[in-house]
Image: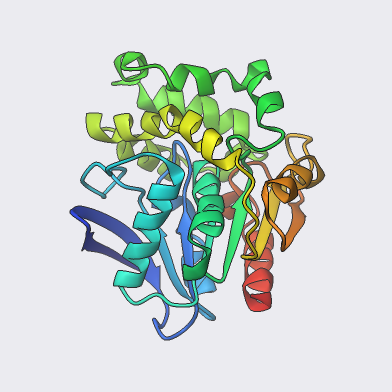
Amino acid sequence: MHQRTTEYNGLSLAFLSAGDPARPALLLLHGWPQSKEVYDQVVDPLAAEHFVLAFDLPAIGDSRGAPPSAQKKDLADILIGAAEHVGARSIVVAGFDVGGMIAFAAARDHGQRIIGSVVMNTVIPGIDPWSKILSDPRIWHFAFHALPDLPELLVSGHQRAYFDFFTDFLAGRKDAVSERHRATFARAYGRREALEAGFDWYRAMQADAERNGQAKPFDTPVLYLRGDADGRSPEDYLPGLRKAGATRLRGGTLAGSGEFAPLEVPQAFMQALLSFARSC
């Protein structure tokens, strides 16, 4: 595994990579509030079959430069383009949380550029059960993070404590998210620009929802995966995704996992990813 940086469309994008660029590519996307290091235990094993790329999303961690938009279709365009720029082909995009929203946008809006998409542990803006999830008081932070300026004001300087709250809430196995990873995630949002970029993902979700709410059939294969720690099932999400236009959709469960599957259940995560990529 190597740490690399590429310049693309005026942005400096950092990523972990391993494997032969001649192999089909896996493009791995983190969520909020993580960084590329959430995948650092699986990059090398996955490289036995794939060219693996795990990016810091624009402005996060070691990436620099604000993207022109935080809408997920635009972030998908940037990240697929950056992967192509460093030689990726036959790309499967996989992400969780906000990274899963981007992976869905990659399938819906850029399907001709990828061969498959893995959407993990997230709800897609504008697609059932979006409204139900937003009404859950445990998901209060979606509304808070979408406010202008206030989240930066209150969270700046307190990233570690604030992020640990969400890590402990979202992980099925809190001990699987090590001290090293927790410290790395806090540092990744230590700059004002990074913190703002992370909250901008939430500020763009209304526009994402309006776009996704317009049904658009697409045939890019999609795997929707969830851990079972929160009691929710993929079956709660698949009908909405089909109604939104996903015509080649399947679901799966990662037993014993919460949101941090690459750290909590790395073997099961890799098995599911490799099996799906082979089918694509």
The image position of residue 207, as x and y in percent, is 47, 33
Q: Which residue is drawn at 43% across and 32% down?
A: 204
Q: Which residue is drawn at 72% across and 63% down?
A: 248
Picture quadrant of residue 223: bottom right
Q: Is residue 1 visible?
A: no
Identify the image's colour scheme: rainbow, by chain, secondary structure or one colour: rainbow
Q: Residue at x 54, y 81 (%)?
A: 49
* 152 sits to left or right of 9: right
Q: Is residue 175 visible?
A: yes
The image position of residue 262, as x and y in percent, is 57, 54
The N terminus appears in which quarter of the rendering?
A: bottom left
Observer-nearest of 235 and 37: 235
Picture quadrant of residue 171: top right
Picture quadrant of residue 15: bottom left
The C terminus appears in which quarter of the rendering?
A: bottom right
Q: How many marks?
A: 0
Observer-nearest of 178 and 108: 108
Q: Residue at x 40, y 73 (%)?
A: 18
The image position of residue 183, as x and y in percent, is 38, 38
The image position of residue 32, as x and y in percent, is 46, 37
Residue 279 vs 229, above or below: the answer is: below
